[in-house]
Image (cartoon, rainbow, N blue to C red):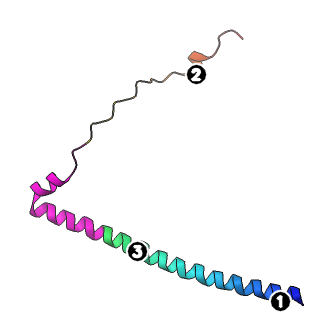
Amino acid sequence: MVVWTLAGGALLVALAALGIARRVSRKLDALNQSYWELRYDYTRLRSQVARLDPEEVEADSPPPAAAPQPASVTFVPLSSIRKRDQ
């Protein structure tokens, strides 16, 4: 009898956890949707401001970073490294 009570309790806890997980999943989806809408609106408004006053937007943007230097390592084929005498 104790085993059935524990199994029933575990089932109730599992169903409660499933309900909580579904609710959190819906909230996360709504938050994700809100984030992308806000980002879209921000980009749209920023482009409108840039059209109205281009000098002000350029002053707010950070200066462009210097281009990275190319790597000094060159390609070395493995055939040139292997031993000739085997």
Q: Are marks 1 and 3 in contact (CB under 8 Å)?
A: no
Q: Quadrant of the N terminus?
A: bottom right
Is 48 left or right of 28, judged from the image as shown? left
| Residue placed under numbered mark 2 in the picture | 78
Q: Position of residue 39 (x, y in %)?
A: 32, 67
Q: Secondary structure at mark 1?
A: helix
Dot 3 alpha-carbon crowd within 10 angstroms: few under 14, some 14 to 19, many 20 or more: few
Q: Badge 2, how many Cα within 10 Å: few under 14, some, many 20+?
A: few
Name the quadrant containing residue 14. Answer: bottom right
Q: Nearer the viewer, residue 76 or 45?
A: 45
Does 14 sit above or below residue 86? Answer: below
Image point (40%, 28%), residue name: 71
User: Does residue 53 show up magenta in the picture?
Assistant: yes
Q: In the rendered structure, which segment of residues is drawn in magenta? A: 40-64
Question: Disc 1 designates what residue?
Answer: 5
Q: CA distance from mark 1 to mark 3?
A: 42 Å
Q: Secondary structure at mark 2?
A: helix
Residue type at mark 1 is Thr
Q: Residue at x 58, y 22 (%)?
A: 78
